[in-house]
Image: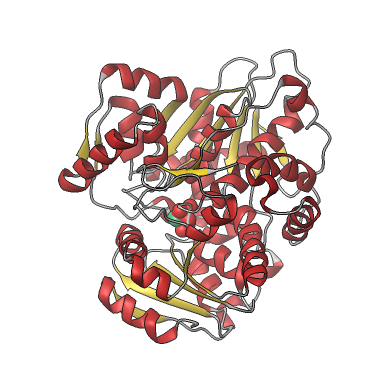
Amino acid sequence: MRYKSTRGQVRDISFKQAVLMGLATDGGLLLPEKIPVLSVAELDSLAGLRYPQLAYAIISRFVGDDIPAADLRQLIERSYASFDHPEVTPVVKKDGLYILELFHGPTLAFKDVALQLLGNLFEYLLKERGEKMNILGATSGDTGSAAIAGVRGKDNINIFILHPHGRVSPIQALQMTTVTDPNVFNLAIDGTFDDGQRIVKEIFNDLAFKQRYALGAINSINWARVLAQVVYYFYAWSRIAAHRDDASVDFAVPTGNFGDIFAGYIARRMGLPIHKLVLATNENNILSRFVASGDYSVGRVVETLSPSMDIQIASNFERYLYYLLDEDAELLQQQMGEFSATGRLQFTTELLERVRDDFATLTVDTEQTLATIRQFHRQTGYVLDPHTAVGVKAGSTFRQGERPMICLATAHPAKFADAVIRATGSAPDRPDSLCEIENKPQRCQRIAADTTEIKDYLAKHALQ
Ligand SMILES: N[C@@H](CCOP(=O)(O)O)C(=O)O
């Protein structure tokens, strides 16, 4: 299995190189040269596998000979041992919808599924090469704590996470800032997540700096993040639809940086019978406008009840666009250039038709989010977090006949207690990991959303 960049200047690199490179050195995003397609018999053989076994069956196809099978199995087993549910990502049925619970990892959000594995993978690869790494990432709330949990206390790794000051939930902030291991550096920037993501990309694009400080990526610009998330689409399907006469399913995905739903798109290209991917956004709805009307134009980032999705410029859109443009790297590069110059892109009717074959979409605003949490709770007793509620509202809107609609539950409601209290009148139960979190010591540096200042900070604190 070899990898290439969407911008065409990087090709024929191995899985290990792709993981360590993160953002491609030509500024693009890495993708497999060829996506493996599973036969019906191979798909059927997934039913009944434990999560780590199924993860191995999927991930190993993208790793090839790069990591010995026994080592890869062991890395996967170890990564999911930290989850508090034997199924890792269980599926529950509520009110006619299937809820795929992705919040059983250490930081109670779907990001743990990929970042527990990526942390172990980095450790493994660095040990093998006798190298060190400085991880640099941006978060709108969930990626940060999950990445920190994936590498805290590990040798030869420092981690620097930018989060938008005051724009993540109080619990999300505490899950990052109360981790005081010496290899963890939290930077609260005066700006939005989009500012943070732009800064991270600018720093990665300074190739001399990237190399000098051995920078690594934990955001979904890193292919390994997307790959690990592909697995739970197969897992959910194997649990509920593998043996049905019509084995097709729909997925509803709360969407911010487009990584999670893009993983579903990859699963579909691999032959998983996904009929529709329902792209659900909050008021930061550039992606929803794109699918609905071809209007891909950046707006201002609005603060909502679902802060992890308060994003306008979604990283993984580039990967999707690459496929939409029939893997034409030159055209892609042209389009990305136009987008950074004008903040907008236009699409032909023919392309839009293809987009609509892949996705259905809905924008869910604050009032609808609160109403969904309230009604779902009244009808089922189940408490949705506000991101999941956005997906559930969209999922119930597009549910058709007998076809299972699987809604991704991307975070535990306890991370967003204020929204839940507003909707239901009572606070969600707190898992043990959040007990006393307000009373723990914190460490965090407030900093301007300025690339040069952040580079200076990195240069001072990086492992060398
Ligand atoms: N929603 C994310 C934003 C970063 O996205 P990623 O998937 O690229 O890490 C968050 O919670 O931080």
Residue 435 appears left or right of 344: right
Q: Is residue 129 visible?
A: yes
- Residue depicted at 39% across the width and 20% down the height: 354
Tell me residue 159's x, y (percent): 51, 74
Is 126 drawn above or below residue 17 in the view shown? below
The image quadrant of residue 414 is bottom right
- Residue depicted at 59% across the width and 55% down the height: 16
Q: Is residue 165 visible?
A: no
- Residue depicted at 55% across the width and 81% down the height: 183
Is 448 drawn above or below residue 425 in the view shown? below
Is 158 drawn above or below residue 167 in the view shown? below
The image quadrant of residue 325 is top left
Residue 258 appears left or right of 236: left
Tell me residue 130's x, y (percent): 62, 75
Looking at the image, the residue that sits furthest to the front is 12
Q: Nearer the viewer, residue 178 or 35?
A: 35
Tell me residue 73's x, y (percent): 78, 52
> In which quadrant of the rendered image does the N terminus lie?
top right
